[in-house]
Amino acid sequence: MTQSINRIVILGGGTAGWIAANLMATHWADKGVEITLVESPDIGIIGVGEGSTPPLKGFMQTIGAKESEWMPACNATYKVGITFKDWSVKPGFSQYVHPFLCQPDQFTAPAFFHNSFLRRKGVDLEGHPDHFFLTTELIRQKLAPLAPPNFPFEINYGYHFDSGLLGQYLARFAAGKGVKHQYATVTEVLLDSAGNIDCLVTDSGDKIKGDFYVDSTGFKGQLIQQALKEPFLSCADSLFNDSAVVFATEADQDIAPHTVSTALKYGWAWRIPLTNRVGNGYVYSSAFVDHDQAETEFRSHLGLLDKDTEARRLQFKVGRVARHWVKNCLAVGLSQGFIEPLEATALDMVQETVVRFIEAYNQGNGSDQHREAFNQRISNRFDAVRDYIVCHYRISSRTDSEYWRACGSNEKISMSLRSILMSWMAGNNITDELEKQKLDAYFPNVSWNCLLAGKGIYPSQEQLKPGSELANQYKIDGIQRFIQGCAMNFPPHMQALAQLRAG
């Protein structure tokens, strides 16, 4: 591709398509680029990706969407981290929080690193991450991550939201930026003699033509996989889950700002609180349990065995395309890949893909000069996220089903993850390994340490011995006082949400 992009056609709506539309319209507002999103009136969205990581906050700020407007419109709540329950059977480690790091944590994280490192060396120190981060206290007290103006530290947070409503909001917002919205069902994709996409043909015979195309057609990958024949690289040998059953339940009376991920017999269940309901889903492997059994187990978990609450069943494939930018097409969202929703990384991947594409295109002055480097960068990000999520399963100490025994003994993991686990088990500082592999850009060092420490990957209690005065230099009660002192600056979560609704 060597010509300027004057017309962009995005095929497929949903959150991914509209994120792409808004980012392109924002970054290229002065370029005169015509952007059209084509959406079939007959194809619904999956609509269950309802949690985010902190980069979504940056996306909203970039496009100019205000929390006071978009959050009430999408029944959104704040999210400061993810609580993992029942992934470990090790005493004292049945639950932990993966925190979204905040600036106050820079004063307490060194104590966590110190204690965790020495505990792996056999010193009897407190190594559970929940004692060291502000996120855990905000969750415990059900506080919103909104500090007053005079608070001297920056606070990171993500969101929970109704993904269907978010897509609709972003569609309206994109229209304000000049993005055109066209309803049509595309039945054929025509290529030119060079193998580029020439035009899209609708069921009514109309042709939709652009200079560049964005594939947001979900798992089918109508452009990237079907028309351009880009290979899909499955990672089903390391991530077994391929199905989900989904329920909505009544809203909480007092909402805590976190997603809860609870390990069940054949996978895990999410719990996502919105202002009007709670979203619940059970992600499982159909190779180990049939769909009816999974739904029954999940109904029992939710206390819905005797209720006729309607369930939705979903199936998915895990993996990614070999390349994300092929010819004159960019794949975003499910069309480019899916690494299950355990860490809510899907929207972050969409943002990263679109922003890095815009950056590569601009640097190449309208050419595909940087396409190879771009593809490698996005693939590296996918693979790093995959390894972090695979790690959850590989280090779980559950053995109560064939599923968990298979997860815990699975040797089909990457050399990258194998090196990290070997470093941890050897009692080394895994920061060195993460920096060597340049993984800190995807999941920060603290996240890896919280994952491994939170699941209790330590010597057993009877192997631990008292440490020296230097080993015991950090006092948990002092750390807790600092964290609780910080938390006093934050309002109750429900109060903050009510103020948003009130405008």
Image (tube, rainbow, N blue to C red):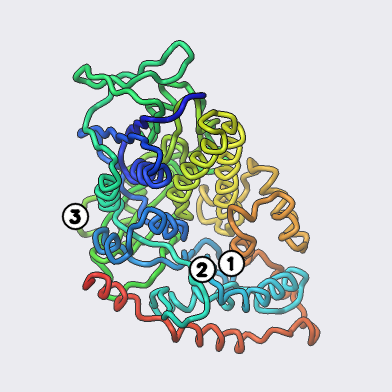
Q: Secondary structure at mark 3?
A: loop
What number is the disc on residue 97?
A: 2
Image coords of residue 289 (percent x, y): 41, 44
Disc 1 marks which amino acid? Gly
Q: How many marks?
A: 3
The residue at 64%/61% (across/down) is 445
Q: Secondary structure at mark 2?
A: strand
The residue at 32%/22% (across/down) is 200
**Up-down: is 40 above or below 478?**
above
Which sits earlier in the primary sequence, circle 3 or circle 2? 2
The residue at 46%/36% (across/down) is 336
Residue at label 1? 454
Residue at label 3? 308
- Would you say 264 lies left or right of 457 here? left
Disc 3 marks which amino acid? Asp
- Binning the other alpha carbons within 10 Å of mark 3 as few (below 14), some (14 to 19) or many (20 upward) gives few
Quadrant of the rendered image containing residue 180: top left
**Up-down: is 117 above or below 473?**
above
The residue at 24%/37% (across/down) is 181
